[in-house]
Image (cartoon, rainbow, N blue to C red):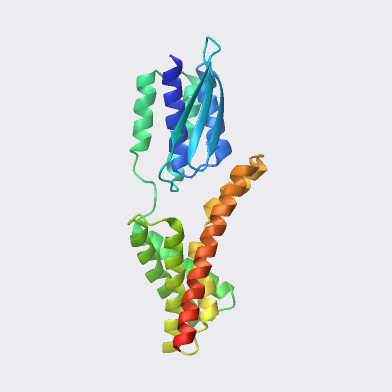
Amino acid sequence: MNVQNVIDIALTAGEILLENGAENYRIEDTVSKICKSYGFNSECIAMSNGLLLLVEDFNLEKITSMKKIKEKHVDLYRIELINSFSREIEKSLLTYEDAKKSLEKIKNAPNFTFSFKVRTFASCMTGFIYTLFFNGSILDGLIAIIVCLITYIVFEKVSKLGFFQFLESFLAGLLIGGLSMFFHTLISTVNTHNVIAGSIMILIPGVILTNGIKDIIYGDFSAGCSKFFEALLIIIAVGVGIGTSLFIGINTL
């Protein structure tokens, strides 16, 4: 197989990994293994929004290619499919046509996620349990269920409109703070702080933080710090949203 085809296969696999929330070290390792399986030496650098790949062909000439990523989300199922794909190539080399067909199937694979109802239920239970964990009463937990229900539904709808992540997190925080204060005005025994503390747990960017820790452990400090900074921005946006709603609510009351 010629070097251009190998680069295409490797970058497409890396693109799928990056788009679906894989760690940078995993992306670089997978891309390099694919190139090595076809007999090419390579160096890959995974960034937050793209891939840079340098491959040395049989004439010892170096070819540099880049792939830019526009959208990112979390889909661990597709990551596992690419892992299986790379292991398959290591065992028995695929032709360019077969490899592209396999990658196209992975791209078009159904999202291996729970239904919207199940995710919403899980969000509500998360808010309820964490509200109790933060010394909230049963009443606070029940209010947190309602707050999480409304917030998650609105957050899902807003995220489909294509707003940038900071604004989405800010609106979600604004909604949590506003709803918590609203229920406190209806039922004075509801503890606003406990409800907010439990409800915001559904907005914590756990996957981003976990991947950042993994990248740092594997020695990729720039990628790890980048993910930590991204998670920090999300947390700040949620905090600003909650603070804004509390400020408006206190001054209104």
Outermost residue, top side: 59
Q: Quick one: quadrant of the C terminus?
A: bottom left
Q: Quick one: quadrant of the N terminus?
A: top left
Q: Quadrant of residue 158?
A: bottom left
7 or 49, nearer to the observer: 49
Please determine whether, in this image, residue 174 is positioned above or below residue 51. Answer: below
Q: Residue at x 44, y 87 (%)?
A: 252
Query: Where does the image place residue 114, in percent across and percent down from the top left?
Result: 38, 54
Specify whether residue 67 is in view. yes
233 or 92, nearer to the observer: 233
Please determine whether, in this image, residue 118 is positioned above or below residue 224. Answer: below
Specify whether residue 143 is in view. no
Query: Where does the image place residue 78, in percent across and percent down from the top left?
Result: 43, 40
3 or 26, nearer to the observer: 3
The number of numbered discs placed on residues in the rendered structure image is 0
Please determine whether, in this image, residue 35 is positioned above or below residue 135. Answer: above
Query: 23 left or right of 183?
Result: right
Q: Quadrant of residue 221?
A: top right
Please determine whether, in this image, residue 2 is positioned above or below residue 193. Answer: above
Query: 219 left or right of 163?
Result: right
